[in-house]
Image (cartoon, rainbow, N blue to C red):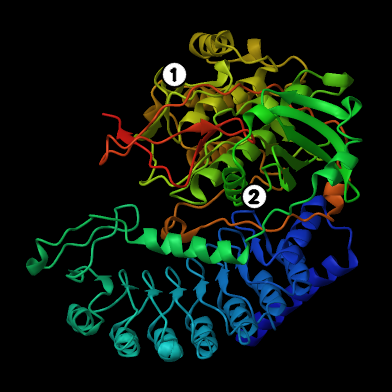
Amino acid sequence: MFLCDMFILGFSCSLLLFQVQMGASYSSRQRELFEIAKSSSCVILSSSGITDEDSLVVAEGLKENNNLQVLTLYDNQIGDAGAQAIGSALRNKANLSILYLSQNKIGDAGARAIAEGLQTSTALTDLRMSVNQIGDAGARAIGSALRTKEDLSILNLSENKISDIGACAIAKGLQTSSELTELWLFKNQIGDAGAQAIGSALRNMANLSILYLWDNRISSSVVKVLSNNLPAKCEFWAENQRVRVQRASILASSSRVAPTPAPRSNTASAPLAASDPTSEQVRQLQARIAQLESNTIPRVSLQVLSQATAQFSESKRIGGGGFGKVYSGVWSGQRVAVKRLAADSIQGAPQFEAELKALSRFRHPNIVTIMCFAQEGKERCLVYELMANGSIRDRLDRKDGTPALSWQQRRNIATDIANAMHFVQTAIPRQPLFHLDLKTDNVLLDAHFNAKVADFGLTRSIPAQVDAHSYIKTKTIAGTYQYICPQYHQDGKVSIKTDVYSYGMILLELLTGQPPSLDLIANVRRELKRSRKIDAVLDKAIDWSPQDKESAHAMAELAEDCLQLARVDRPSFRDILTQLSQFVDQGSAHAHATMPQEPRMEHHHSSIEEQLQPHLDSDLVRSRMEQQQQHAQSAEVSAESISRLSHPHSAIKEQLSPMTNSIVVNASMQSQLDSEN
């Protein structure tokens, strides 16, 4: 049976590879994946809906990448066939330092292939393959590969199917990993023998700070022995139906990371939940990847961009606003949009560079890419990919006589926007990115009508998790009135639900084709309340089928939820994606409708989305047309000092970003986070 399964798997992988090689006519999305995989030392393709077939394309790109140091592919749909292709591509990648493959569908065959691919990766420091289907065979292969990983710092194989045999193999493999700081093996099938082997291997590892073994099959007696024999500073969690143990010398993690264990009787005075022990890990990972990608976005001379735009000719101007003008041009053989920032809105050079670097971390298939920049004296220019179909508003207005967007296209656009917003709010938990001017003018469409959000704002260095009950208070109000929620407009309160309100207005525009207004909200609500139907307000440019009207009604109800006055009553973007999936046509070939999984511990610890060099030679980028329209932006207004709860009198400066037209909180700043009662 095993040989038969291996034959079928091998045949499937070979067939997929044959299709990829023979059908070199990649889709535009696959071309983009290929360019990303081959072009950067730091390849980030998490939460991208990557399938086994896509994995083969990614693998082909990785084979051509001689500088690979970071690869993150968590939260995709990669199975054994895809993992085998990735594993083969990783051979001889001696500089690979970080590999994330969590939240996929990888079984033993895929895990073996990954392990074989990592044999020569002696620089590996961080390996994560949690939430897969790896059993003992895969764990044994991984354990064997770990024997040469002396610098391994973090290993996460939680939520798999590993029992004692696999645990013993992992323990043996870790004996040479003297730098190990974290081992995550919770929610497996490990019993006493496996736990004892792990404890023996870790006993003398002075740097070990985390060992997570809860939800296994370990007896209370073995848990107690392990607890007493581990390094004093190690945080140890192990539980079954009878016992929960926590080391006395450490602080408990926050409730978002794991259920808080009951402390031992002699640790009642320990400062439980006093701080988040993951924050240092996040900072360390940020620093590591920042060092790897110190020049994420290429810098070019101002002269190059001047030539690209015919000396910033008015004939090349395609948009502008309070923060500058936008020109079409040709750079490096590609059609691009060049945003020349107004001199009177310019930040200092260090702040500009710091913000640009931070923005580069948030690259995603549904976010407009910054391709390069120029900075000379007071001159600042940003170069964006040029979008073939302009903005959503352009298409809803039928600009230049273009046909109306179909209902299928509008549903896909709604999903694309939600994917982008979910990503920027969760990719770096302590550094969420707020848009604050999300509107149909700022969502652009590529040649295939995939939506990409533009003109993001940025907040960073927030000292606590921002959730539905938390906000940053400011009087620096940016954005467009019709899209601004009451808390932001009236009180300057910004939370992760601020952009949800704006998104609700976008949904109404997609449904009706009408421009944003308070009357539009009132009209749709009236129709929903009066007849439970919205036929009277639906866009007449669409020939609505009964099934389409059904899904449109569901979207209208979702929009109403997003437009609730109280922010705690609005859904999160994760909730929005879940609801969208219930009425998006499952037969659609749209590439970005894949739903993210439930939040996992690993996301909150280290999903640091440092991004890659832009894929500047991509055929997809080269095909962009000169029709991108950048609409007027809000002007800068006065700043307000804000402060931390613990230091209410420490004032800091806040301002708007000339790059994004939204709030920028510098890395040195401290933000006030209040809780809504």
- Residue holding disc 1: 486
Q: How many marks?
A: 2
Check disc 2 and give the amino acid type: Arg
Q: Please name the residue shown 63% across and 29% down the image.
A: 345
Residue 169, horizontal then vertical, whole percent? 44, 89
Quadrant position of the N terminus in the picture = bottom right
Check disc 1 and give the amino acid type: Pro
Task: Please say if 337 is above or below 64.
Answer: above
Left or right, 446 with reference to 509: right
Give the alpha-carbon distance from disc 2 to disc 1, as whole Å. 30 Å
Residue 373, horizontal then vertical, whole percent? 73, 46
Q: Please name the residue shown 86% across and 32% down the image.
A: 312
Residue 259, horizontal then vertical, whole percent? 28, 57
Q: Please name the residue shown 19% across and 84% down the image.
A: 225
Residue sitting nearer the eye, 459 or 13: 459
Left or right, 12 with reference to 607: right
Q: Secondary structure at mark 2?
A: loop
Quadrant of the rendered image containing residue 305 = top right
Residue sitting nearer the eye, 48 or 461: 461
Mark 2–mark 1 contact, CB under 8 Å? no
Let me know if residue 589 appears in the view.
no
Left or right, 671 with reference to 417: left
Q: Secondary structure at mark 1?
A: helix
Dot label at residue 665: none
Residue 12, horizontal then vertical, whole percent? 74, 73
Left or right, 543 with reference to 500: right
Crowding at mark 1 (Cα within 10 Å: few <14, some 14-19, many 20+): some
Quadrant of the rendered image containing residue 396 = top right
- Residue holding disc 2: 363
Let me know if residue 149 appears in the view.
yes
Q: Please name the residue shown 50% across and 73% down the image.
A: 126
Quadrant of the rendered image containing residue 587 = top right
